[in-house]
Amino acid sequence: MSSKVFQPIKEGKVREVYDNGDSLIIVATDRISAFDHILKNKVTKKGAILTQMSKFWFDLTKDIVPNHMISVDVKDMPEFFQEERFDGNSMMCKKLEMLPIECIVRGYITGSGWESYKENGTVCGIKLPEGLQESDKLPEPIFTPSTKAEIGLHDENISFERCREILEKEYPGKGASYAEQIKDYTIALYKKCAEYALTKGIIIADTKFEFGLDENGNVVLGDEMLTPDSSRFWSLEGYKPGQGQPSFDKQFVRDWLKANPDSDYLLPDDVIEKTVNKYKEAYELLTGKKFA
Ligand SMILES: Nc1ncnc2c1ncn2[C@@H]1O[C@H](COP(=O)(O)OP(=O)(O)O)[C@@H](O)[C@H]1O
Ligand SMILES: [Mg+2]
């Protein structure tokens, strides 16, 4: 008996995607990127921690919006995946037709949002109160979509009107409704999860969701959800507006790379060890479970 051999249909910086007919198997590897480079080190168990974190959020929010998760148990997947290297870090998902919008939501002003605010007081066409400092909490979370850039280009921030136009062009007669739905879902998901995370000592400053359509044209939440790779997590304890905040997971990596510009992206073991522990800490704080 021979079992089917799978090749990834897509290999990103960190994740691999396998096609399984009506479903996809999305595998989070132990690769880590910083400053747009893949590091030479592997962060042991990072992939599993991030996949289990997504699972936690998908379960927590399935009453707000249906999501693509089918299973994170390799026993439910084709034989090819019943192997140590896929165990815990793979998610079988319903295949969707992805909408060409990155649904970013910001509860705090930082990153490209802060840059834009300093320039003209707005983010994605949304006027914000005067006098905000870097990393301040916003009065209300804001939906700041961007287009998915072609490889090598940076994503482009767009207004909600532009988002509606893009979807209306692709889905005549339906785009406006899709735009309203993904905006409302994005804000509702962020509110619930950010409030929850705050009770666990973690600020979710901003995050990105991706939605797609199922076979009946319903909007479904896809991709990964609220991992440190798709979000900015800050420690509540160390939060200090008026400056940039250290990233919860990659602070040691970034600090070390800045101090060692000639390292060629190979880091010492102790920096990697500290980084693994930050991922575990985030998982354990958020889920209240020990990472096994
Ligand atoms: N349920 C799904 N159906 C189809 N495509 C999906 C689904 N969930 C996520 N995707 C897509 O899978 C890809 C995951 O690849 P990723 O490693 O994030 O690379 P990138 O974001 O650079 O495209 C993304 O293009 C994402 O839009
Ligand atoms: Mg992606």
Image (cartoon, grey):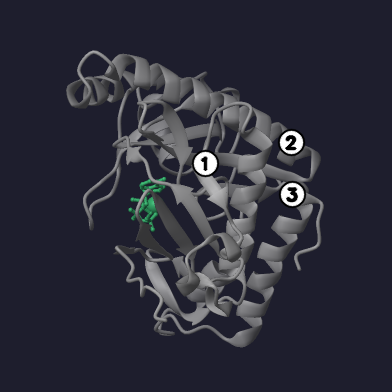
Q: Cβ–Cβ below 8 Å for labels 3 and 1?
A: no
In this view, the residue in front, 245 or 21, is: 21
Task: Report whether residue 199 is seen.
Answer: yes
Q: Which residue is mark 2?
A: 196
Work out how far the residue at label 3 is from the one at label 1, CA to CA, in angstroms: 16 Å
Q: Where is residue 36 drawn, in percent x and y? A: 37, 64
Is the residue indicated by label 1 positioned so its CB lies within 8 Å of ligand 2?
A: no
Residue at 45 percent across and 33 percent down: it is 220
233 left or right of 159?
right
User: Which label's residue is closer to the chain start, 2 or 3?
Assistant: 2
Residue at 46 percent across and 73 percent down: it is 80
Q: Where is residue 138 drawn, in percent x and y? A: 58, 26
Mark 2 packing: few (<14 Cα in 10 Å), some, or many (20+)? Answer: some
Mark 3 packing: few (<14 Cα in 10 Å), some, or many (20+)? Answer: many
Secondary structure found at label 1: strand
Classify the position of the N terminus by image quarter.
bottom left
**Amino acid type shown at disc 2:** Tyr
Task: Report whether residue 244 is seen.
Answer: no
**Amino acid type shown at disc 1:** Thr
User: Which label's residue is closer to the chain start, 1 or 2?
Assistant: 2
The disc placed on residue 286 is: 3
**Residue 249 higher or lower than 252, as above or below:** above
In this view, the residue in front, 172 or 4, is: 4
Q: Where is residue 67 drawn, in percent x and y? A: 52, 37
Q: Where on the picture, by quarter, is residue 205? A: top right
Secondary structure found at label 2: helix
**Residue 223 higher or lower than 172, as above or below:** below
Work out how far the residue at label 2 is from the one at label 3, CA to CA, in angstroms: 8 Å
130 left or right of 158?
right
Q: Which residue is mark 1?
A: 207
